[in-house]
Amino acid sequence: MLNPMKLLFETSSAAVKAIHSHGLRSGLTTIGIAVGVAAVIAIIAILEGTSASIKGELADLGSDMVTLKPFTNTNDTMLGVTNKLSYNDYTLLKGKVSGVKDMTVSTTPFSLNRSVSIGQFSTVTQIIGTESSYQNVINVYPQAGRFISPSDDKRRRRVAFIGASVARQLQIQDEPIGKFISLGGDWFKVIGVAEKRGSLFGFDQDNYVVTPFSTAKSLFGENATSNIEIKFNPEKGSDLAVIKQKMTRLLRQRYNLADGAPNNFEFTTAEKTKAQFDNIINSVTLVAGCVVGVSLLVGGIGIMNIMLVSVTERTREIGIQKALGATPNYILSQFITEAVLLSLLGGVVGVALGYACALFASLLVPSFGDVAVPFWAILLSFGFTTFIGIIFGIAPALKASALNPIDALRFE
């Protein structure tokens, strides 16, 4: 009786010879497996690259930044009610909540981007009305010039701090300081241009114009107070949960919310955004995995069908092997090994093809980031293809091992 290692070696050698002797058929057989594995690897590589890229961009925003913004529940929305925060909410929290390092208020007067122009050049951009403290909370720094100052806000100066994309679109990136731009029909003097930040979730982070909060309120009236948000950074070592609890108590008292009534505001953090994004990634991966799993099962059925045909074609060969002393277990092992090798071959081709597709996709869509195939994905692919080979190789292997040697030798 052969020992397990020798049996594995001999059956593997026989399987390799059988696959090599029918190269074209073997290659076509593995296509289903290869396509399925390639799809899995490409999806995982793209998701890994996108996830790493977005998490890096979120980190650049400041992982400790917290945004307090209005929240309207579904019932109120159905009734046409829209909750808002006010500048008074900002002054209330700024003066009474300890443990906060920096706090600022900002407003986006218009839900849609507005036109900004200079001479013959124009673009559409987001308008942000805020205070000088916005710079420290958001970590936005000037590439040229300066950010808005408390004096600008106090005197309602028509000055603008613009993003790098706006400067580029208006063709003033070389000498932006002192230029006058038209923003919704009003003229603003450019006092600074921000450092380039790139994109986040596919959105340009450099397409904005910052004006003093008081200026935005004066020029845009009701629009300037309809989308107010409060942003802050906790002090190092402070308990964010305690800070949020204090703010919640103050705001609920201010708005006279009854016990049990939902808050008309909510807190959003970078960590919360990361967690939400991770949930999306996991859901997409799960759905894609299920869809691709069906493809791999179809590929496994293809391997089983080809192996059944192979058993029929090699009936006399099997009969000769048995006549020379090959046991049913030996024949069983040989055909299962052949099915596993075919499946693994498809897995190897699929991993290479999937990574190549992911690289190509990242070239076409830079926001995918640097694609990467984690080692666990490769192990999972090979493990699953091995499982497919074993499961769908059993039926042909059992058929081959059960052949009567006399009948097999008579087979024409």
Image (cartoon, grey):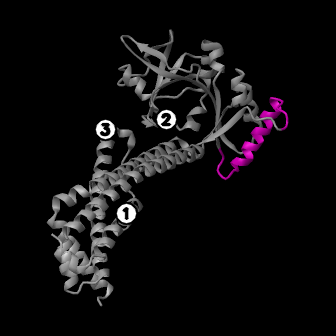
* Image quadrant assignment for residue 129: top right
Decide if residue 328 is on the left or right side of residue 126: left
What residue is shown with label 1?
388
Q: Residue furthest top?
A: 185
What residue is shown with label 2?
141
Decide if residue 325 is on the left or right side of residue 242: left
* Image quadrant assignment for residue 306: bottom left
Decide if residue 283 is on the left or right side of residue 118: right
Residue placed most toward the observer, 179 or 216: 216
Q: Is residue 191 above or below residue 25?
A: above
Contact between marks 3 and 1 (CB within 8 A): the answer is: no
- Closest to the camera, between mark 3 and mark 1, is 1
Q: Which of the image's four quarters has the N terminus?
A: bottom left
The residue at the point 72 percent across, 34 percent down is: 94
Residue 364's disc is 3
Distance from Cα at disc 2 to Cα at disc 3: 31 Å
Three-letter code for the amino acid on which mark 2 is drawn: Tyr
Q: Is residue 174 above or below residue 37?
A: above
Q: Which of the image's four quarters has the C terminus?
A: bottom left
**Residue 258 covered by magenta stretch:** yes
Q: Which residues are magenta?
A: 234-259
Query: Nearer the N terminus, badge 1 or badge 2?
Result: 2
Residue 345 in the image: x percent, y percent?
26, 62
Residue 81 in the image: x percent, y percent?
71, 22
Tell me, yes or no, if residue 82 can be seen here.
Answer: no
Three-letter code for the amino acid on which mark 3 is drawn: Leu
Decide if residue 202 is on the left or right side of residue 252: left
Distance from Cα at disc 3 to Cα at disc 1: 33 Å
Residue 112 in the image: x percent, y percent?
52, 20
